[in-house]
Amino acid sequence: MNLEDIRQLFDYTEYANHLVLDAAEKLTEEQLHQDVKISMGSIFGTLVHMAAAEWIWLERWQGNSPAGLWKADAFADLPTLRAEWQKIEANRKAFLDGLTMDALHADLDYKNTKGEMASLPLVALMQHVVNHATLHRGQVVGMIRQLGIAPPAVDLLFYLLARK
C-alpha cells in the first residue's frame, strides 16, 4: 500500500462518515439515543465510539497513548460530536500530508487501553482504522433501517462512482 492508497481510504472514510452523520442529524433525539442492542447501544453511542476510535489511533500515531475512549455522555449533542470529529479529520489530514513511505511501513509501538504494549506497521494500523469505521458505519446504517428510514449508501463503490 502506498501513500495515495491510504489517503484515498481515509477520504472514503470521511465521505461515508459524513453521509451517516447527515442521516443521523435528521433523526429525533429519541431515535438517536434509542437502545437497539447493537454495537454501542444507540446510533449516538456508536457514532461517539467511531469518532473516539479515530481520535485514539491518531493520538497513537503521533506518539501518545491515551488510556481510554470517549463515552457518549461526553457530548451534549450530535453537532458537538460532529465539530470534534471535524477536528480529528483536520489533524489526520495534516498527519497524512506529512507522512512518508518509510514511516507508513515502519513499525509503530503503542500502549492499548489496558496499558499493554503492542507494535504493528503503521500501514496496518491505518487499515484497521478504516475497517473499524466501515464495520460501525454498517451498524449505524442497520440501526437507521430498523427505524424504518432509508439509510445512505456508504459502500466504497458509491464513493468511487461519486469521484468519477
Image: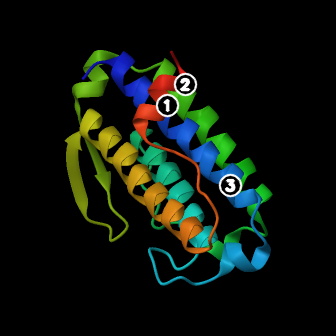
Q: In the rendered image, is residue 73 in sight?
A: yes
Please name the residue that numbered disc 1 is placed on: 159
Q: Please state the horizontal and vertical placement of residue 127, each as a whole percent of the image.
A: 31, 40
Please name the residue that numbered disc 2 is placed on: 162
Q: In the rendered image, is residue 71 in sight?
A: no
Q: Please state the horizontal and vertical placement of residue 111, each as a whole percent of the image.
A: 32, 58
Mark 3 vs 2, N-terminal side: 3
- When the figure is inspected, residue 98 is found, relative to residue 147, above or below; the finding is above
The residue shown at (75%, 80%) is 30
The Cα–Cα distance between marks 3 and 2, rounded to whole angstroms, is 18 Å
Q: Nearer the viewer, residue 146 or 140?
A: 146
The Cα–Cα distance between marks 3 and 1, rounded to whole angstroms, is 16 Å
Please name the residue that numbered disc 3 is placed on: 23
Q: Residues within 10 Å of mark 1 (few under 14, many from 20)?
A: some
From the viewer's perspective, is 1 left or right of 138? left
Q: Residues within 10 Å of mark 2 (few under 14, many from 20)?
A: few
Looking at the rendered structure, the secondary structure element under dot 1 is helix
- When the figure is inspected, residue 41 is found, relative to residue 66, above or below; the finding is below
The residue shown at (53%, 82%) is 36
The residue shown at (62%, 71%) is 148
